[in-house]
Image (cartoon, rainbow, N blue to C red):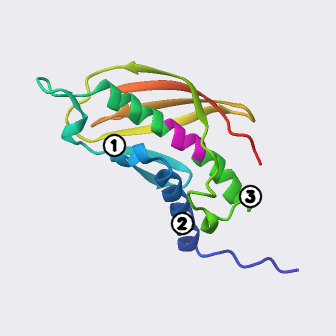
């Protein structure tokens, strides 16, 4: 018995990138903030490029706390949704070619989201990574950290709890 020949790596990468792009396009606020996601395997790094509209205190200048919190929350949501999509894609239950805004799985809903502001966000690009602590059928817990020049000196961190969408 012969095993089927594996797909070329580039085909797999393109399929995963298309699925991530479809997921991100499904949240218009992500485009407003300008957030993009860098994917390496199943790990995502969110990038918030600097924009003058994100400055809250022009005297310092510092990133607005609301922009920072929104960046952390969308990073957590996309990481959580991506972990669900990843499972479905790798098991073969989901074909990324079929993903459109209409067929995209529903996103989890935020129950609560607590932000710790650790230092002022400077007028430069920011980065964030989220870690799913627990993801069950009905509930998920996610931790996310944001930094700018040095990952060891985060500007903010957050913990969020999310209501998971019903599985179809």
Separation of residues labelled 1 and 2 (CA atoms): 26 Å
Queried whether the magenta region covers residue 88, the answer comes back as no
At x 57% / y 67%, what residue is drawn?
Answer: 15
Q: Could you tell me if the residues under marks 2 and 3 are in contact, i.e. CB atoms within 8 Å?
A: no
What range of the chain is rendered magenta?
A: 76-81
Dot 1: what SS? helix
Q: Circle 2 sits on which residue?
A: 13
Q: Circle 3 sits on which residue?
A: 91
Q: Which label lies toward us, 3 or 1?
A: 1
Dot 2: what SS? helix
* Front residue of 60 and 149: 60
Queried whether the magenta region covers residue 80, the answer comes back as yes
At x 64% / y 58%, what residue is drawn?
Answer: 103
Q: Circle 1 sits on which residue?
A: 33
Q: Which label lies toward us, 1 or 2?
A: 1
Marks 1 and 2, the one that precedes in the sequence: 2
At x 41% / y 19%, what residue is drawn?
Answer: 116
**Residue 95 in picture, x, y percent from top left:** 67, 65
Dot 3: what SS? helix
Q: Could you classify mark 3 by the number of other residues whose Cα lies within 10 Å: few (under 14), some (14-19), or many (20 or more)?
A: few
Marks 3 and 1, the one that precedes in the sequence: 1
User: Please, which residue is most extreme toward the front here?
Assistant: 102
């Amino acid at each position: 018995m012969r095993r089927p020949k594996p797909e070329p790596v580039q085909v797999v990468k393109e399929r995963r990138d298309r699925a991530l792009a479809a997921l991100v396009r499904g949240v218009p606020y992500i485009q407003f903030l300008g957030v993009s996601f860098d994917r390496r395997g199943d790990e995502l790094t969110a990038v918030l490029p600097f924009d003058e509209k994100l400055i809250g205190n022009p005297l310092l200048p510092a990133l607005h706390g609301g922009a920072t919190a929104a960046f952390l929350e969308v990073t957590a949501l996309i990481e959580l949704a991506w972990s669900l999509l990843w499972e479905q894609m790798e098991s073969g239950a989901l074909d990324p070619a079929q993903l459109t805004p209409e067929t995209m799985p529903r996103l989890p809903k935020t129950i609560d989201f607590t932000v710790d502001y650790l230092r002022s966000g400077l007028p430069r690009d920011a980065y964030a990574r989220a870690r799913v602590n627990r993801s069950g059928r009905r509930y998920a817990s996610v931790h996310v950290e944001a930094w700018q020049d040095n990952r060891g000196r985060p500007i903010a961190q957050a913990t969020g709890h999310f209501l998971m969408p019903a599985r179809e």
